[in-house]
Amino acid sequence: MSRSEPPDWALPSWDAVPSSSAPSNAASPAGVPTAPGTFGVRILRVSEVTRAIRGAVRAEPRLADLWVEGEVGRVTVSSAGHAYFALKDERNQLQCVWFRDDRLRSAFEPQAGLRIVAHGRVDLFEQQGALQLYVESIQPAGFGDLALRFEALKARLAKEGLFDAGRKRPLPVRPRTIAVVTSPTGAVWRDICHVLSRRWPLARVVLVACQVQGEAAPASIVGALRRLERYVEQCRVAGRPDDAPAVTILARGGGSLEDLWAFNDERVVRAVVAHSLPVVCGVGHEVDVTLADFAADMRAPTPSAAAEIVVPDRAEFAAALRRAADRLHEAGARRLAGAARELAVERRALEQASPSARLASLREQSGLLFDRATRALAGRLAHDRLRLGRAQETLPRLTA
């Protein structure tokens, strides 16, 4: 848009139409009628005014991303889960809208009378002509500067999609080589090595040393991740893929928000997202949350837990192998028994179909027929002898 062209939300010209030579209901030079008694001034529709106000508000960058502190008025939650309330001070108030999806991401819920700090943007709800703060996140008032910076950076990076669940990568099941990015002097490195050797001693562990606290820590962490990338590439080029780590643990012990701030640095977050290997972040204790946790492929509550996550437990793995062997043995035994039954059936079928079996069957059948014929003939002869005997007995009486 050139300097001479007004934005599409700008108000029309307010130039008056000379009224000395035109009736009060005459048309303006633009062809738009003017109302009686307005001296030819252009009459605007309500939607034109609200559109112009909305455009002016959106053109002000300070209203697009701001923090507002105030006291919460009455809170109303709609059936859709959206919250509506007012933020007020001793003189004025500002209507606020907090949509359901943003509410569900927050662990803090505003209540009437509480002082809060809300982060969001100001815009005009045109249908009602109302200026509103569209809230993205809320914290109780009194949070320090670091906490506010944390929430602001978290919201900005989340908008870029850096924390989306869809970009999280699965971890390898049984990695042969594991990279650990941490300080070489702290207890964290020893704890991780102890857990890995206890759970999965087959794994090879590579330390990528860096600073984990102080002003130089963010650059040191980013540099360590880059050195690791070069090492992985060197292993692949040299034909030693098993020496290349398959997963990265980013770790440090617990501390205050200031102590852990290096893991909230934007450079570190982007380096974690861009890392070619899946990253498990184990920073601080369970209650400590950093932006690197959101960027990693998986968050662990502690460094030791991160080590437990990346490898299987050898005892559980051995038990699983035994169960698998038992299942294979049972399946093999069932198959052998079934094959033996099938073989017996086939053998009987072959025996029945062989010439010798056929001759034996015919021999058996002929024997049965011979026996039956013999019994029938013997019966017939016995019957005839009986009749002959009777005839011999009656013959003398007939000749007398």
Image (cartoon, rainbow, N blue to C red):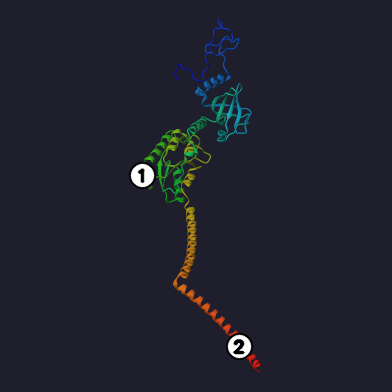
Residue farthest front in this picture: 399
Q: Secondary structure at mark 1?
A: helix
| Mark 2 in CB contact with mark 1 (< 8 angstroms) | no
Which mark, by number, is residue 303?
A: none
Q: Earlier in the sequence, mark 2 or mark 1?
A: 1
Q: What percent of the width, then of the height, locates residue 97?
A: 58, 28
Image quadrant of residue 223? top left
Percent x, y of residue 1: 45, 20
Return the residue found at the far bottom: 400
Closest to the observer: 263 or 353? 353
Kindly identify which residue carries mark 1. 236
Numbered disc in front, either 2 or 1: 2
Residue 366 point in image, percent of width and height? 50, 77
Q: Which mark is residue 388?
A: 2
Closer to the camera in the image, 60 or 229: 60
Q: Is residue 397 left or right of residue 204?
A: right
How far is disc 2 from disc 1 in space, using C-alphas?
114 Å
Q: Is residue 55 above or below residue 187?
A: above
